[in-house]
Amino acid sequence: MKKILSFAILLSVISMVSCKKDLASLNEDPKHPSSVPSAPLFTNAAANLSDLMASTNVNYNSFRLYVQYWTETTYTDEANYDINSRSVPDRWFATLYRDVIEDLTRASSIAPTETLLSEGEIKNRIAINDILITYSFYTLMTTFGDIPYTDALQVDSVLQPKYDGAASIFDALATKLDNALSNLDASAGSYGTSDIILNGDVSKWITFGNCLKMRMGMLVADVDAAKASSMVLAAAPNVVSSNDGNLAIQYISSPPNTNPVSEDLIQSQRHDFVAAATIIDTMKTLNDPRLPFYFKPYNGEFTGQPYATGGGAFSDPSDIVASPTNPHVYFSYADMEFLKAEAVERGIAVGGTAAQHYNNGVTASIEEWGGTSEQAAAYLAQPHVAYATAAGDWKQKIGYQAWLAYYNRGYDAWTEWRRLDYPVLAPGPEAITDIPVRYTYPVLEQNLNTKNYDAASTAIGGDDVTTKLFWDKF
């Protein structure tokens, strides 16, 4: 998917230059057309976003390490929370702004000029763009805190964008998402096959937007209970309601359109990651039926490396995880059921009981990975798993099971771990800091946008990986 634009752009360039004989056309660069149709721009943005979120490349995405699903075999820098040697924050920041949000913004400006599109298609394209723009800014805001928002992408007029407060960005994103949802029309077309995430299915984008709204609502539950309740109640009836409705990008077997995890684990011919003892030991203690779907046995046993200590003689990620066609899941039935269980515990009237939604979430996750309903029932019947008898308060019960269910979705797991504070994780013995709860700002921002960087750093309480963000107060 990384090269998915090349053929479309080539055709566009040929059509633009073939009919031009005048000398003025010599000033045009045929390799860098000034106008690209909205569809390939959307495809490129969707591919870059999906690859970024799915990746396990330590130059971009180290979140599977932070939540101790995996650990590193030889070079343990990222497992010990060194995020600056490889400029990890710079790459995460740049990819979302430059390769996702900018392309989606351009697609929205171009779509109304495309005469072959109906009014309904144009409206749907812009609304879908806005949903993914919301998702991307939400991801940036929950990674860094205060970020450029109002001034973002005004590259012709604002070279040093100011940083907006994360709480105000959240409110703006909630409004943008609501507007996008109100503009979607399932009876009209959208991006068709150019939509590599949901294949142009507008009804699925309505579900996607509501799942995002549900997740956003729960993000602020500890700091704005009224806003959380309003968002969750509006979204809950319209989210994923079975595993058949899980929202994911389906990768294919042919490079470069394979799942980037496969590229990192198989195509790279490296052996950089193994299971962390943290998750292996937990799953063995709980008799978790997902264990063989998550990992391979090593010498007949499932074994995990003590976190961030190095060494490769431990269980590897499973063949399912390493498959080039393994989908990257954006939102699943299990996600939504755990959020509903939490909502009930917070007094938000989404219907059902916390235990029912918890059981649904656990069962959905086990079945999603290939387990059976019988295995799920046996798992839930254990006193240390059953909602009534599992250890701790509701945050601990839901937090542990959500952590297990989010396996292979490092960023989502990291965010839920920061919200719920479970499981209790400890840094490795040579960690240079405590477990990060945010990325530090990019070095380029520090050097080229110093005044605004300094103001943002002061506003959030210091540009450190341990600075808690506005929604993460408990």
Image (cartoon, rainbow, N blue to C red):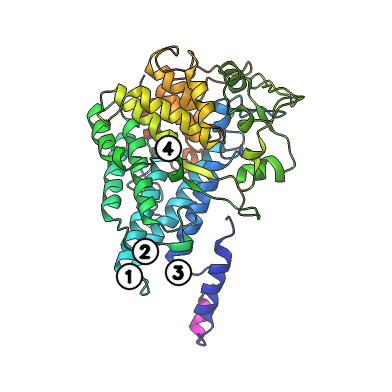
Which of discs 3 and 4 lies nearer the camera? The answer is 4
First in sequence: mark 1 vs mark 3: 3
| Residue that numbered label 1 is attached to | 118
Q: Which residues are magenta?
A: 23-27
Q: Is residue 339 left or right of residue 371?
A: left
Q: Are marks 2 and 3 in contact (CB under 8 Å)?
A: no
Instruction: Classify 10 Å Cα crowding around label 1: few (below 14), some (14-19), many (20 and above).
Output: some
Tell me, for residue 463, which label it has, or none: none
| Residue that numbered label 2 is attached to | 189
Residue shown at the point (25%, 39%) measured from the top left: 234
| Mark pair 3, 4: CA separation | 39 Å
Helix, strand or loop at label 1? It is loop
**Residue type pointed to by label 4:** Tyr
Q: Is residue 305 left or right of residue 358?
A: right
> Which of the 4 quarters of the picture holds residue 430?
top right
| Mark pair 2, 1: CA separation | 8 Å
Instruction: Classify 10 Å Cα crowding around label 3: few (below 14), some (14-19), many (20 and above).
Output: few
